[in-house]
Amino acid sequence: MSSTRTTTTAATTRTGLAIETAGLVKTFGENRAVDGVDLSVPAGTVYGVLGPNGAGKTTTVRMLATLLRPDAGEAHVFGHDVVREADAVRSRVSLTGQYASVDEDLTGQENLVLLARLTGHGKKPAADRADQLLTAFGLAEAAGRQVKNYSGGMRRRIDIAASILNTPDLLFLDEPTTGLDPRSRNQVWDIVRAVVAQGTTVLLTTQYLDEADRLAARIAVIDKGRVIAEGTKGELKSSVGAGAVHVRLRDAHRRPDAERLLAAVLDAPVQLEPDPVALTARVGGADNGRGAAQAASRALAELAAAGITVDNFSLGQPSLDEVFLALTDRTPEEDPA
Ligand SMILES: Nc1ncnc2c1ncn2[C@@H]1O[C@H](COP(=O)(O)OP(=O)(O)OP(=O)(O)O)[C@@H](O)[C@H]1O
Ligand SMILES: [Mg+2]
């Protein structure tokens, strides 16, 4: 890894993709851990790979980072084949906790300086870069302490710091916040944002929907070694419907009128709630919820025009959790072959 960054143009392939895979497969015995994964990761963004335990996230990352050989399919990183041009790939990527493993017996500062020196920084630049990262990662106070005495959150941060000493073009972060408390998670998120702001592409695997929601520009949802959905957060959310409109009326006797009206305006089935004044309608939408909001306000206007008083109204956006459940909560028979 060189100490200076290659230019963005050089870092980006003709297609503007940092990663491109087609039909990537890895089998362990009978287990198809990665079962035909196609990914297109735009350069310069955070790309989220979201999936439950055992989905195949780490296996995919290991193949992309040239640590594991695919059994079938192809993967290119910045246009380089991960098998035939593994060295070229390695010179461009960094994997937290792998290439930049820190020494438990050294202090945080000693680790970063050592790694910077090993990757070609002079004495002063190495010390400067170490200090810069320690400060940026909130580790200045702990800089002189041995890493073995760091908390889990501090340990995760020093790992990431070590992996971006040389500003890689592509950084793999494999579940960087699993097991961290909310404050430490927030710190790691800030670091990820800062890394991307400097031009690095980040491939982030996570089991946390809110993490993908906050950080990733695009998300691939993987389950049982397959990509079951891919897109921007908005696209994923609208793929399961934009949300639900909840209405509470002043007068229960107007509910049949309200039901007819809502069904007509929203063009969706309306559900009568056990509460005699409440109705719910699921609103679809292929446009990231904006259409749902417009439909909902039209519905409110129509109710008012018909003299039906609404006491309470809400439009719920689906969370990524709902999306994920909707995507993964299916029987194997329903899985696409
Ligand atoms: N070296 C290996 N040998 C045998 N099986 C493996 C190996 N590595 C992974 N597997 C299996 O492959 C499947 C995918 O594992 P992988 O580690 O990629 O999942 P993951 O999505 O990273 O899960 P987690 O969220 O738990 O980290 C699992 O069934 C796992 O048991
Ligand atoms: Mg994993």
Image (cartoon, rainbow, N blue to C red):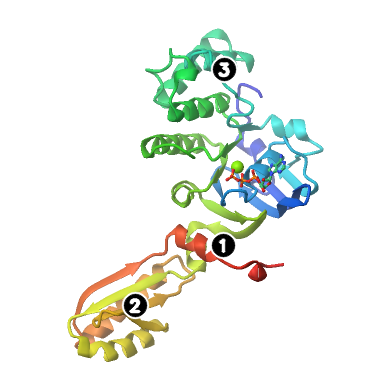
Does residue 257 appear anywhere in the picture?
yes
Residue at 80%, 46% in the rendered image: 71
Mark 3 within 8 Å of ligand 2, using the beta carbon: no
Q: Which residue is tagged 1?
A: 328
Mark 2 Cα-neighbour bin, 10 Å: few <14, some 14–19, many ≥20: many
Does residue 306 appear anywhere in the picture?
no
Of 3 and 141, nearer the camera is 141
Please state which amino acid type lies under the numbered disc 2.
Thr
Q: Upstream in the sequence, badge 2 or badge 1?
A: 2
Q: Check the image and report above or below for 298 versus 10.
A: below
**Considering the numbered disc 3 on the image, is that residue within a helix, a strand or a loop?**
loop
**Considering the numbered disc 2 on the image, is that residue within a helix, a strand or a loop?**
strand
Mark 1 Cα-neighbour bin, 10 Å: few <14, some 14–19, many ≥20: some
The mark found on residue 213 in the picture is none
Q: Check the image and report above or below for 228 versus 242.
A: above
Q: Upstream in the sequence, badge 2 or badge 3?
A: 3
Please state which amino acid type lies under the numbered disc 3.
Asp
The mark found on residue 280 in the picture is 2
Q: Residue 121 location, x and y as percent?
A: 59, 14
Q: How many marks?
A: 3
Q: Which residue is tagged 3?
A: 103
